[in-house]
């Protein structure tokens, strides 16, 4: 049994992580400032503390007082176009705030850290499918703010008794199969959620951002990963660190790219409802295509994806969305 601090645990991914840790008997403390998080998504058996990861005094008190063994760091700002419009928010809340969190972790001798990185660190890759060796060249402030954090982690791991796993998530979607949590972020910008909202008549139409990309149907291509498979990767990472694994970086995706139009079709199949769409210009900061080679995650950490079927992903997202009413 471990004693885990989950930052950003009131958010989409962190709330699923919290349930998964509790389900296997770990103890969980959630630290979240509720900037985009939702208090009611935090499992009742978790201890919830409302606060900021940059509040070093608070974080040190939590780490020491609760005898935390490992930190999983989800807290951050996550919207690519917003990072283009307001870069300092991203360098502040992702890079600088994480620096402060890490300082507290080092001071309290935390040795195990799992970090939410992103496919956005690759930018506009030349390869159709990216491995962890693909050069990092982010094309938006969001990706740069996360890559800088990866650099900090590498440097810290050389200087201190501290080991980390950075998981580069591709596009995370779906919801807890048990229906306990899902994506409830107000004003969420993610494609699958938006398409479900449009199907349910909660938005007049789904905007398709760009139809002139160099992709088979002209719309953006992404590797959508089910939240349950993503959470499973975190459990593997935590266990590997507990067993002495070296610090490392892993892609999290399926190696399968789907276009915006293919997602619309999946939502229509699952919902049995036509999704009204509106074609418009590209969104600032968006690459044409991002697809993961996650062979390293499978080989090294023994990750076995189980929920890759796009209709299963969309169905869980749609069911959650319908209940949100
Ligand atoms: N959703 C995706 O597809 C995706 C893909 C790649 C990486 N990520 C990363 O995963 C992490 C979680 O993303 P999400 O989709 O769950 O987003 P989210 O917005 O639902 O969750 C982020 C949580 O962090 C909290 N938070 C933000 N700044 C904070 C701060 N300074 N102190 C304390 N709490 C703070 C928010 O209130 C929220 O609950 C982020 O770091 C994001 O960059 C997400
Ligand atoms: O209403 C919408 C929303 C999105 N898209 C398109 O759908 C694709 C996916 O967009 P979105 O769901 O917003 O995700 P990304 O911009 O790819 O970013 C997500 O995936 C990244 C990793 O790939 C993460 O780092 C980010 O945090 C996360 O928001 C892109 O081609 C968008 O242009 C639309 O056409 N209409």
Image (tube, rainbow, N blue to C red):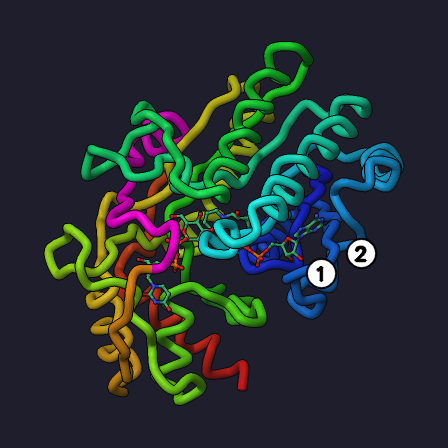
Q: Residue at x 81, y 35 (%)?
A: 63
Q: Is residue 154 left or right of residue 311?
A: right
Mark 2 Cα shell of 10 Å, populated few (<14), some (14-19), many (≥20) = few
- In magenta, the rendered stretch is 283-301
User: Is residue 22 located in the magenta-colored stretch of the structure?
Assistant: no
Say which residue label 2 marks.
50
Between residues 51 and 125, which one lies in front from this camera angle?
A: 125
Indicate whether 81 appears above or below 59.
below
Determine which quarter of the picture holds residue 281. Answer: bottom left
Q: Which residue is mark 1?
A: 34
Secondary structure under tag 2 reads strand
Q: Nearer the viewer, residue 126 or 315?
A: 126
Q: Residue at x 30, y 47 (%)?
A: 287
Per the model, the C-alpha gap separating discs 2 and 1 is 7 Å
Q: Is mark 1 within 8 Å of ligand 1?
A: yes
Q: Quadrant of the C terminus?
A: bottom right
Instruction: Compare residues 312 and 281 and report the one nearer the observer.
Output: 281
């Amino acid at each position: 049994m471990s004693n885990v601090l989950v930052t950003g645990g009131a958010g989409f991914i962190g709330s699923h992580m919290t349930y998964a840790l509790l389900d296997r008997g770990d103890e969980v403390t959630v630290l979240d400032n509720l900037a985009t998080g939702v208090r009611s998504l935090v499992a009742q058996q978790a201890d919830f503390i409302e606060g900021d990861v940059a509040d070093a005094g608070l974080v040190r008190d939590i780490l020491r007082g609760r005898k935390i063994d490992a930190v999983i760091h989800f807290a951050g700002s996550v919207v690519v176009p917003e990072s283009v419009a307001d870069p300092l928010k991203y360098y502040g809340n992702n890079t600088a705030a994480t620096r402060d969190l890490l300082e507290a972790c080092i001071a309290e001798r935390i040795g195990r850290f799992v970090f939410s990185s992103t496919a956005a660190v690759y930018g506009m890759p030349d390869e159709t499918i990216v491995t962890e060796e693909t050069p990092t060249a982010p094309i938006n402030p969001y990706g740069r703010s996360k890559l800088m954090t990866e650099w900090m982690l590498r440097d810290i791991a050389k200087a201190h008794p501290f080991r980390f796993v950075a998981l580069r998530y591709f596009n995370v979607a779906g919801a807890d199969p048990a229906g306990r949590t899902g994506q409830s972020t107000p004003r969420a910008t993610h494609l699958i959620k938006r398409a479900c909202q449009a199907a349910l008549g909660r938005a007049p139409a789904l905007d398709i951002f760009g139809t002139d990309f160099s992709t088979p149907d002209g719309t953006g291509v992404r590797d959508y990963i089910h939240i349950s498979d993503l959470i499973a990767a975190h459990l593997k990472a935590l266990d590997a660190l507990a067993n002495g694994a070296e610090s490392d970086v892993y892609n999290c995706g399926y190696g399968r790219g789907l276009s915006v139009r293919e997602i619309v079709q999946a939502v229509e199949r699952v919902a049995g409802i036509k999704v009204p769409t509106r074609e418009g210009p590209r969104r600032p900061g968006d690459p044409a295509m991002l697809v993961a080679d996650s062979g390293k995650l499978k080989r090294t950490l023994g990750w076995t994806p189980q929920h890759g079927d796009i209709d299963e992903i969309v169905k869980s997202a749609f069911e959650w969305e319908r209940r949100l009413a």
